[in-house]
């Protein structure tokens, strides 16, 4: 495997981590969705490059799913849902941008510290891919905990899932990758439908998860 | 006879799928609820036939061995009794208009798909397939938790969904890591995900990567077991969904996730250089036990209270399996079976109680033994059993857990016994108010059948008094497998 092959894979996976950081500081829902579409696009490129460099044609299917479903269909659908819901464009964050970014850097450092020493030296591609993938997963979790709004939590979950797909495609020759990415797409479709269900329930007047904090089922 | 065994294995998976398709199409509550019961009965018979027929060779995807057969039989049995309970419960929900016939059709189809997902998780020999099956079972229960479409039900379903998805995602990352660990040894492709092949060569795996993988798997599947601090979804999901679903959540779905953790624990144990998985499970188990015991005191909703009790007992089970060794594993297995039977019986009782009283608030339910003796005494026996009083089965399994802990790690026994006593006090305190005193609330008659509840309680009582030797030796054998 030539150096250039490795460098490009490295660059694309690193790009995914960078876009994850961009997700962290968006304070408007539409911008968040656009960045998520970019995230999915990076994933598509990364997976397609893995398919090419591993000579694994079935991974092109995963790349196609990422492109059509995650980069186009889901962002467009969420755009329309936000429009119909007329929910506030501003996202309420629990923590400020500064501490969030610092926490994000800490998480990336953590995943490098965890993954690099334990993976075999002989396979640098899989090794660094895995470290990047764990970073994306942890950053996705960070997005989920720092946002109070249901749509942005969904976006956080979807970026987390992109990290998982990156890890699965980086693991050379892993079976069931396509099936797992299809299963995840179904899961995400369910979540989006769930957000939509929130809307059609007329008694529901907010998609703000903060409202859930009031609810413990313990009211008299 | 391998053909026969294969057929039984196929039947366990195919009957629920076929039944789900039929139930989704058929209208009418009487036919569909009976069909649901019949499908569950057939699945259970197929599962029981696994005992007598020869086992098929473990394949690339499916496997029957001494460990999972216990889980499958328990799963299909509780699935069957819950379907009987569900038939009478759902009739009442239709009368009061909480469910419409369309939703009922959906409910029955989902029930069968959930049974399929859980059975598939138990028989899968492929760690990827196991993950998909657990995800399927989770998704169907999410949909059923939200089926009443009230404000609270949708919020509970949403919370369950988000936390469950995060758990699932972490478990998948762990699964990928296991594959990456196995790949240099087993080569690329499907072989590196087949459990029976992995276990044979686990000693050659890179221990460091396997350790990281196990942490992710424990956190991921542990979320679904409801271990603290990842339990937040569990009380809401139990309290707001239909009670049959609370019964299967507590009695079965938690076991599915626990089974996944156990499979990976065995894998880790086969690799001598890897960390011992026990202390991690012991810590999470103890935390869950003590935390949930204290939370029991502040509950005002009856279903929520028993949901916390489920966290407590899953903590005890995780603790026992984490301790390891033949005696603690035996106690863990026994406790798991007893908890499934008792907790689902309690939820059957609670379901009928909530229906006749028209409320789930503990403060509004009093004097059940006077107003509804059948239900009230059933609840009393169930709660006494779950609190761990002799002569019922849970007393015996808890006793075994405690004695094996005292023998090996006396210091750990202190928080264990403390947690057990705190939970015991909370349950008996609440039981007094619920069961005795001046009756309050609705006094209407319940037309429901109490047979499933009494059947479970009878089994728990029988197990507490006398365990048949074949069962004991079977459990001992499985306990040795668990290491």
Image: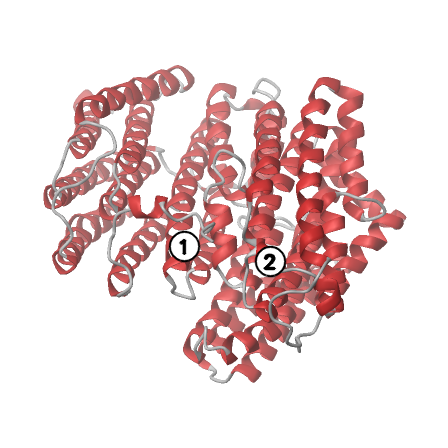
Q: CA distance from mark 1 to mark 2?
A: 16 Å
| Residue at the spot of label 1 | B157
* Mark 2 burial class by Cα count in 10 Å: few <14, some 14-19, many 20+: many
In which quadrant is the N terminus of chain A drawn?
top left
Disc 2: host chain: B
The structure residue drawn at horizontal position 55% and vertical position 42%, both measured from the top left corner, is B298
Residue B108 screen position, x and y as percent: 51, 71
Disc 1: host chain: B
Task: Left or right? Give the position of A30 relative to B204.
Answer: left
Residue A133 screen position, x and y as percent: 30, 30
* Mark 1 burial class by Cα count in 10 Å: few <14, some 14-19, many 20+: many
Q: Image height check: is B209 above or below B348?
A: above
Q: Image height check: is B481 above or below B243?
A: above
Q: Looking at the image, is mark 1 or mark 2 earlier in the sequence?
A: 1
Q: Which mark is residue B247?
A: 2
The structure residue drawn at horizontal position 52% and vertical position 34%, both measured from the top left corner, is B228
């Amino acid at each position: 495997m030539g150096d250039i092959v490795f460098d490009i894979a490295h660059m694309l996976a690193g790009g995914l981590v960078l876009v994850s950081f961009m997700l962290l500081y968006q304070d408007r829902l539409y911008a968040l969705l656009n960045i998520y579409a970019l995230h999915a696009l990076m994933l598509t490129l990364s997976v397609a490059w893995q398919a090419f460099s591993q000579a694994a044609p079935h991974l092109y299917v995963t790349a196609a799913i990422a492109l059509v479903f995650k980069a186009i269909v889901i962002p467009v659908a969420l755009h329309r849902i936000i429009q119909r819901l007329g929910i506030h464009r501003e996202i309420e964050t629990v923590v400020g941008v500064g501490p969030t970014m610092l926490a994000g850097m800490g998480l990336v450092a953590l995943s490098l510290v965890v993954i690099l020493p334990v993976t075999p030296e002989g396979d640098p591609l899989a090794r660094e891919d895995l470290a990047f993938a764990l970073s994306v997963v942890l950053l996705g979790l960070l997005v989920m905990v720092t946002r109070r709004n249901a749509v942005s939590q969904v976006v956080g979950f979807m970026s987390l899932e992109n990290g998982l797909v990156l890890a699965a495609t980086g693991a050379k020759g892993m079976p069931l990758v396509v099936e797992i990415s299809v299963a995840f797409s179904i899961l995400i479709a369910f979540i989006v439908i769930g957000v939509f269900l929130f809307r059609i329930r007329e008694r529901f007047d907010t998609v703000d998860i903060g409202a859930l904090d009031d609810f413990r089922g313990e009211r008299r | 006879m391998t053909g026969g065994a294969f057929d039984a294995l196929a039947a366990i998976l195919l009957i629920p799928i076929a039944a789900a398709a039929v139930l989704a199409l058929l209208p009418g509550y009487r036919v569909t609820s009976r069909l649901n019961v019949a499908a569950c009965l057939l699945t259970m018979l197929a599962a029981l036939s696994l005992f007598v027929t020869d086992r098929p060779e473990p394949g690339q995807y499916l496997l029957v061995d001494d460990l999972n057969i216990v889980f499958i039989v328990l799963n299909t049995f509780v699935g069957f009794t819950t379907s009987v309970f569900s038939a009478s419960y759902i009739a009442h929900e239709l009368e009061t208009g909480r469910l419409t016939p369309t939703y009922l059709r959906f409910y029955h189809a989902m029930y069968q798909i959930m049974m399929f997902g859980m059975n598939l998780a138990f028989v899968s020999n492929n760690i990827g397939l196991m993950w998909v099956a657990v995800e399927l079972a989770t998704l169907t229960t999410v949909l059923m938790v939200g089926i009443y479409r009230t404000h609270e039900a949708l919020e509970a379903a949403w919370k369950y969904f988000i936390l469950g998805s995060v758990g699932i995602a972490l478990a998948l990352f762990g699964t990928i890591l296991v594959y990456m660990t196995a790949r240099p040894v087993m080569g690329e492709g499907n072989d590196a995900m087949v459990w029976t092949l992995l276990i044979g060569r686990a000693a050659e795996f890179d221990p460091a990567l396997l350790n990281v993988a196990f942490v992710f798997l424990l956190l991921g599947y542990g979320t679904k077991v409801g271990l603290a601090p990842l339990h937040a979804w569990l009380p809401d999901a139990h309290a707001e969904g239909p009670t049959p679903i609370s019964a299967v959540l507590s009695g079965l779905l938690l076991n599915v996730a626990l089974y996944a953790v156990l499979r990976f624990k065995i894998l880790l144990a086969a690799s001598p250089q890897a960390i011992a998985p026990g202390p991690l499970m012991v810590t999470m188990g103890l935390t869950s036990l003590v935390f949930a015991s204290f939370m029991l005191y502040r509950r005002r909703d009856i279903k929520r209270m028993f949901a916390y009790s489920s966290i407590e007992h899953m903590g005890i089970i995780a603790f026992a399996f984490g301790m390891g060794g033949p005696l603690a594993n035996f106690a863990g297995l026994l406790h798991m079976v007893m908890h499934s039977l008792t907790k689902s019986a309690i939820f059957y009782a609670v379901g009928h109680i909530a229906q006749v009283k028209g409320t789930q608030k503990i403060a509004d339910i009093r004097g059940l033994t006077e107003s509804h003796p059948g239900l009230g005494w059933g609840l009393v026996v169930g709660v006494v059993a779950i609190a761990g009083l002799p002569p019922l089965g849970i007393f015996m399994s808890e006793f075994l857990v405690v004695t094996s802990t005292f023998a090996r790690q006396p210091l750990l026994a202190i928080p264990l016994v403390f947690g057990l006593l705190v939970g015991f006090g909370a349950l008996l305190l609440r039981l007094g108010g619920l069961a005795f005193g001046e009756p309050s609330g609705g006094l209407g008659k319940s037309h429901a059948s109490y047979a499933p509840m009494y059947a479970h309680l009878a089994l728990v009582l029988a197990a507490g008094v006398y365990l048949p030797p074949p069962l004991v030796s079977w459990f001992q054998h499985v306990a040795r497998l668990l290491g």
